Image (cartoon, rainbow, N blue to C red):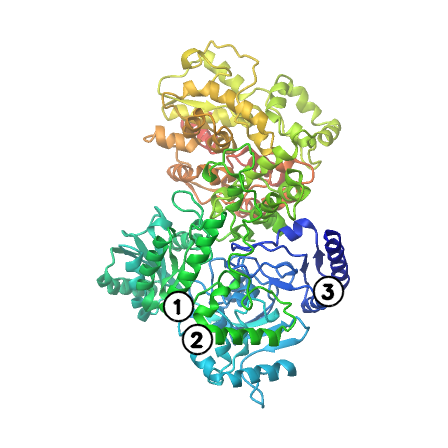
Amino acid sequence: MADRTETEKRDLTKDLAAAVRGEVSSAAADRALMTMDASNYRRVPRAVVAPRDAEDVAAALRVCREHGVPVVPRGAGTSIAGQATGVGVVLDFTRHMRRIVSLDPAARTAVVEPGVILDDLRAAAGAHGLTFGPDPSTHSRCTLGGMIGNNSCGSHSVAWGTTADSVRELELLTYGGERVRAGRGTGPTGAPTGLPPRLRDGVKSLVDAELALLRTGYPDLPRRISGYALDALLPERGTDLARALTGSEGTLGVLTGATVRLVETPAARVLAVLGYPDESAAAEAAHTLLPHKPMTVEGMAADLVGGAAGLPEGGAWLFVEMGGASPAEAAARAEALCRAAAGDGTTGHAVVTDPAGQRALWRIREDASGTATRMPDGSEAWPGWEDCAVPPARLGPYLRDFRALLAQHGLRGTPYGHFGDGCIHIRIDFDLLTPPGIRRFRDFSHDLADLVVAHGGSLSGEHGDGQARAELLPKMYGPELVGLFGRFKDLWDPAAGLNPGMLVRPDRLDDNLRFAPLPGRPVPVEFGYPHDNGDFSAAVRRCVGVAKCRNEKTAAGSADVMCPSFRATGEEQHSTRGRARLLHEMLAGEVITDGWRSPEVHEALDLCLSCKGCRSDCPVGVDMATYKAEFLHHHYEGRLRPAAHYSMGRLPQWLHAAAPAAPAVNALARTPLAAVAKRLAGVAPERPLPALATETFTRWWWRRRRAAPPAGGRTVLLWPDTFTNHLSPQVGRAAVRVLEAAGLRPLLPPTAPLPGGALPQPALPRLRRPPLCCGLTYVSTGQLDRARAVMRRTLDVLTPLLAAGRPLVVLEPSCAAALRTDLPELLADDPRAPRLAASVRTFAQTLEDFAPDWRPPRLDRPVAGQTHCHQHAVLGDAADRRLRERAGLTGQLSGGCCGLAGNFGFERGHYDISVACAEDQLLPAVRRSAPGTEILADGFSCRTQLDHLGDRPGRHLAEVLAEALGEESGER
């Protein structure tokens, strides 16, 4: 049977490849990437097709009909109800069919292909003062085709409605190959226009026979998304076929183009934030704000918002955006709304006019679909009842009943969402791993469906029914109307070839759960995964598919890093989500069958820069750098590793050995022998080898200390990391100068434990013991046994020295991040590890925490450059920004990753991607900077990338301050 299935798959792939000009694949990796969307469900496709145009879609449908294989249209895969998964052929529209065909500002319409990303359309329309109204939180990566398929809404639906309100005309192909041009209105016979005769006559007959049912069977509320919108075909509603097909989840036709309506955007926007005692009070008040014509009325509670800055007092908040012809008018409207709301139980309010402050607050809301997947105690929460909606005036009572139902079933969740439209989003801590937990999930779903219907609501208020809710549609619509849905489906898709199992004759809501094939018990791993109870499967499950990592551009003013390799390649497998999907399938063992030896997972992780950006930027905290290190450890266990792992992975050993011969090594690096050495070491031929310091930082330190022991002051331990010690000792010397000027007493740790935790003395001999190491290069190449050994030695030496509360000052951000996170997570069994991690400080943090009264020299010039990706992800840069401000260094550093990323950019085969990552943010920011701008780059990799690719070198902040101190004192 398995052999026959493989033969059928090969024949299907062969015929598709012959018929379609776009890419066709049945490879394990490509199929694995499409097994899931952002829902609880998983289905394995046979093949993936990326059509180039409508003719490709028609050809793919013809082949699938011949083979009797179903088809699933897919956009960005951010659907939450499972409708973007399928067992047949997935049509991936994100690769090619993403043109904005035309944009007519006068008519306020645009013609788009289904793969157009919403933010791209908004940017094009924005040049004319227009926008596309619906704006789901995934606006930076969701596609128009997916929005039309699900009838997406977003925060501004109280002003601009749902996607169905913005659709003018749809171009589709049925599974049978019929071309449809669906709009509004009828022809001479009273039938919808744009249909082939079979469909034209069938639709008219169906509507004419069921007028009474269509007029009485639908609840009247703004967020009614569930089922087919057949009431749009009523003559009194204009026989709007485009509206009726919007939200059909790819079950009736495959979208190949759409004409959509654009709306005028206000010249200015202001955000009013209203505080309430709790979410019920906020829910009760939301609909009372609608007469003020707000653009948004979004609700969030304290258990989701946390300690966000800029919020007024309260336990829940409404984010209410007001527009105006000018900032003053928008602010006046916001103030008026706040005054009116004050009598409805508000605990306070804030009017946020600053665009940066508004972005910061909106980011909390937009990330909620990810952050809500973890409860405050770290337990997992899942979609499934993500977006039911009730009439806005019923939201308060409904929410109280909803909370009572959660308690009755012993469940927890954090409601938030579109309170002004009566639509609630929530992730609930269902146990979807065990049979009893799944039974509870099913029972609760049935009970909640009854509750929603009792309040006059819709099972779906935004994301569609998919598999999550379609089984329950009879509760909402009754068997007669659901039967009509089935007849409509059979009219359009008699072969049931389009997205079967969705909406009509659906799969059960507890079938196809994505967790089912995962191992039943934790797999043996090296890292501790403290946030996932040591369970690697739970760590991988963190990725729920919201796909923030698929952002092709970083938002204006954002310092986000994730995901540089996706922005460079545009390939799903090189996104954080894509890699998590492949790891999930590796653990499942159905599609990816080689376990830790998997070449598919290795290929995807090969272009992961280990930038750690996802650790902070991913709403659910996926940590792909750690997962990559874990995978590489197992993948190469007992096997020969790539040359780069031996050369750059063990860099601290080689640099320590080469230090005495640094002049000779540097001379050889300038001869033709360097090319041979690079080839043997796995180094990219395009990269020059960095010069070794002829005097290491530690040698300089001991020489200086014997000559002039440091004066008094609070002692801080200065970490002599490998890069500072051997490759940029000037940074260490500058840091010593600044720390001493600030009244601190920097000391270097010894290379071996001293009796009783004594501090190193000036007379201590310079032993040839290997220096201490954070283990970074071993971790990044997956040599975790060696990493653990060097980290334990570091603990042995540092633990007694740090016992008095001394900080460990680390100048290299990547090493600081390794000591802060990798060390305690790899040595999870060692109680000393978290104490060491807690002692780590960056250069700026040390000055702020231990020399708060020190005033840095004033430089009064602009800066450009980049915040190190590891610092952004692990350590934060708030102290650096404050230090720069005090020193008169103005301007912002860019986000992103420099692309060198330690060993990554030096490895053979990575050069082009490394350059593309640098061109994403770092190099353009430096090129835009004015003459005289200080180029800051605290990371050795960042400075090296600038040296290799730019014409303006970067410096560590310590170097800039030390130079200014010298100028103040007259030193030259």
What residue did someone put label 2 on? 218
Kind of residue sitting beneath label 1:
Val
Q: Position of residue 634 (x, y in %)?
A: 62, 34
Left or right: residue 420 compared with residue 78: left
Left or right: residue 277 compared with residue 455: left
Q: Position of residue 627 (x, y in %)?
A: 56, 39
Q: Position of residue 753 (x, y in %)?
A: 47, 14
> Does the image show residue 821?
yes
Kind of residue sitting beneath label 2:
Tyr
Q: CA distance from mark 1 to mark 3?
A: 41 Å
Classed neighbour count for the residue bearing mark 2: other residues with Cα under 10 Å, few (<14), some (14–19), many (≥20): many
Above or below 228: residue 738: above
Q: Residue at x 46, y 83 (%)?
A: 212
Upstream in sequence: badge 1 or badge 3? 3
What residue did someone put label 1 on? 453
Above or below 954: residue 179: below
Upstream in sequence: badge 1 or badge 2? 2
What residue did someone put label 3 on? 67
Q: Secondary structure at mark 1?
A: helix
509 or 381, which lies in front? 509
Above or below 917: residue 288: below
- Taking the view exactly as shown, the residue that stands out farthest to the bottom is 188
Upstream in sequence: badge 2 or badge 3? 3
Q: Nearer the viewer, mark 1 or mark 2?
A: 1
Q: Residue at x 62, y 61 (%)?
A: 93
